Image: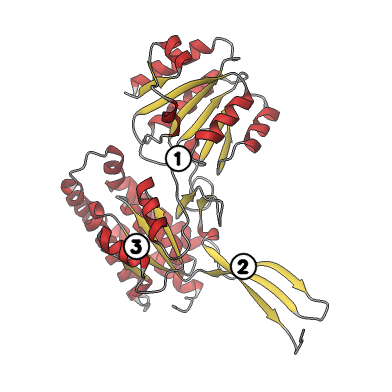
Amino acid sequence: MNTLLSIEKRNAVLTRMAVLLEQERAIIKSVNQQDMTNYSGDDLAMEKRLLVDDAKIDGMILSMQQLASQEDPVGVERFHFTHENGMKITNKTAAFGTIMIIYESRPDVTVEAGGIAFKSGNKILLKGGKESLLSNLKIVSLWHQALEENNISTNWVEYLNYNRVETQAFLENPTQRVDLIVPRGGEQLIAFTKKHATCPVIVSGRGNNFVYVNAEADVEKAIAIIINGKTTNIGVCNALDKVLIDTNLPNWEVLAKQLTTELQKFNVEVLGDKAVAKATGVKAIENEEIWYEEFLNYKIVIGTVNSNEEAIAKINKYCGGHSASIITKNDALAQEFMEQVDCAAVYQNASTRFTDGGQFGLGGELAISTDKLHQRGPIGLQHLVTNKWYIYGEGQIR
């Protein structure tokens, strides 16, 4: 096990990494262009995640700077108790040890997730997808440069250039100790990791997020929030897939028509339940199974409910446990909705696109967990720790 690096050393590496990313900006972009050229798939969302442009590099640099300025998440006292026999008992946060991150097509994860794991005192094993190999190797070389310049072993950040068979073999019989695995990607990747891993896995699960437009909604806000949730970035887990409209909303059919028109301006394929299809002329859904689907595409389903209870029940049945938003002026009702809906993030009058570590003030995230153990929602620096008990005695025996 690697001995814990001092916070000064960890911060120095992060600060240096920010400088190197700026210095190597042009080279990172040109290497990424090779990955883009080599990518032959037809997955629009994956292609979008693969691209590294100036805005993405700016984000990488900012995340390194923010991480370097944050307080050390390791060694924070969480509980203190003095036993009647005089023993002093303290619980403090501790690093996991080694964290493995498995991800697809996102070179920015090589920077941000790597940085969060490193800042929280952990060794990182990065297992990226083959589509982003060149970009990832370039970024890992910068990690190694930042470590070497601070006289720290490069094995703190390791890239696992494995194919599927090699990855499975490593998960089932790791050649080194792994304390935690975080898969970031589609349902197949998550299922594969959970099936083969021999240590704890935090699932960064699917989205399939809902917006519920209540009878007391501000209709203009509802439209703006839905357009934002669906169209700003289709390839992310906080994008919007489903809309429920309360039929008690005055002239709900007018809203459904307006929404359909606006969404179609962005080339979104709109499907409706029977009532919405009848009111708007959009294609009706073929069966109820579609309510379970996460689209990661220009596609949305709009349906109706007759009560708040029905909306809550439908969301709890079909959503991915990620994010759900209610659009209403009734605060008491919103509170009830937010307490009853079983999602990691629940909103009143805001877009689900905000479910993100940076937006929540965490300074970035390793992943967004739809599990309930050990952390739910965006996993920031302060969540990437386990804990440890320290007991100070003077010869006490039981």
Is residue 266 at all visible to an observer of this figure?
yes
User: Residue 76 has which mark?
Assistant: 2
Image location (x, y in percent) of residue 57:
33, 51
The way the protein has been coloured in the rendering is: secondary structure
The residue tagged 3 is 126
Pointer 1 and pointer 2: residues touching (CB < 8 Å)?
Answer: no
Q: Earlier in the sequence, mark 1 or mark 2?
A: 2
User: Residue 322 has which mark?
Assistant: none
Q: Earlier in the sequence, mark 1 or mark 3?
A: 3
Q: Looking at the picture, which amino acid does disc 2 mark?
A: Val
Pointer 2 and pointer 3: residues touching (CB < 8 Å)?
Answer: no
Q: Could you classify mark 1 by the number of other residues whose Cα lies within 10 Å: few (under 14), some (14-19), or many (20 or more)?
A: many
Of circles 2 and 3, the one toward us is 3
Picture layout, residue 78 above or below residue 103? below
Circle 3 — which element?
strand
Picture layout, residue 67 above or below residue 270? below
Circle 2 — which element?
loop
The residue tagged 1 is 207
Q: Could you classify mark 3 by the number of other residues whose Cα lies within 10 Å: few (under 14), some (14-19), or many (20 or more)?
A: many
**Furthest residue toward right:** 84
- Viewer-proximal residue, 226 or 100? 100
Q: Looking at the picture, which amino acid does disc 3 mark?
A: Leu
